[in-house]
Image: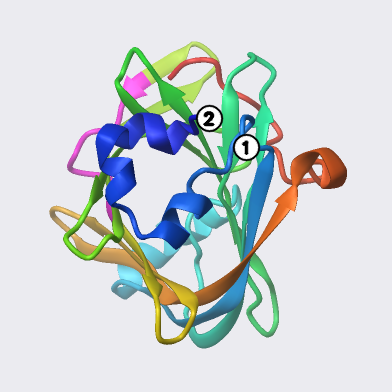
Amino acid sequence: MTSIFQRALGADFDRLHPSLRRRFSVGLDSGEACIGRGTMDRVWHGRSFVRPFLALGGSRNILVPQAGRDIPFVIENVPYADSFGRETVTFVRTFSFPRHPRRFDATMVFSPERGCVVDYLGTHQHLATDLHFAVDGTGALVIRSGEHRFREGPVDVRVPDLIGGDAVVRESYDEAAGRFRIQVRVGNRRFGPLFGYEGSFDAEFVKVAEHGVRAGLRPVREEARA
């Protein structure tokens, strides 16, 4: 049984902490989804001039245009076959801010052509980002973003590095606390830090055949181009 994440990591998958191996084994073969519930100790964004861009992205569930501390958090990693027959895993994150919950949506597929996981961002999959996976010396998973592409109708362009965001995600398992820990940082090479969050969560594994894919979890529009 091979998940899209196992394909991305190859032999290094076995170097992950055992709890991370199960979490990133979610897929059509395993039949499992992973639902994480916890608290983000901190959700932050960069300087004031980035807020309009975050607000624009927030309208399509890309990034989060709010900041706060001790924010309840849910992440839903559910596998399904998309309308093009590709194995897809949701990364839908919900931040329950006091006045207005915010979602940060992504769906991931493995692209043999690109040799990596492709991350489609937002409700309409307008942005596609290459993700490169690695395992550090502690057994944590480190994900770094690569090239970004914008797709809308006939438009298919590479996003220049000058305006693109570089993301680094580190997910680990805290043995003492018995919880997963996550750190996310998105920055721009010219403008500096843009957005990020860090915190911890517990994970529940459920059978997709029994629970299905809940309404509203899949994107409104699916993009065939990787």
Q: Is residue 165 magenta?
A: yes
Residue at x-position 51% and y-position 52%: 22
Which numbered tag is attached to residue 1?
2
Q: Quadrant of residue 171?
A: bottom left
The magenta region covers 157-168
Q: Which residue is mark 1?
A: 30
Question: Where residue 8 sits in the image (x, y, percent)?
Answer: 34, 32
The answer to whether 141 appears left or right of 216 in the picture is left
Say if 21 sits above or below 209 in the image: below
Which numbered tag is attached to residue 98?
none
Secondary structure of the residue carrying numbered label 2? loop
Question: Where residue 4 sits in the image (x, y, percent)?
Answer: 46, 32
Query: Pointers 1 and 2 in contact (CB under 8 A)?
Result: yes
Question: Where residue 196 sits in the image (x, y, percent)?
Answer: 37, 68
Question: Where residue 212 sits in the image (x, y, percent)?
Answer: 82, 41
Three-letter amino acid code at disc 1? Ser
Residue nearest the viewer, comparing 201 with 148? 201
Image quarter in which the C terminus is found = top left
Residue nearest the viewer, comparing 20 with 132? 20
Can the viewer see residue 128?
no
Three-letter amino acid code at disc 2? Met
The answer to whether 100 appears left or right of 133 in the picture is right
Q: Is residue 89 magenta?
A: no
Can the viewer see residue 208?
yes
Residue at x-position 69% and y-position 74%: 100
Q: Residues within 10 Å of mark 2 (few under 14, many from 20)?
A: few
Residue at x-position 18% and y-position 60%: 191
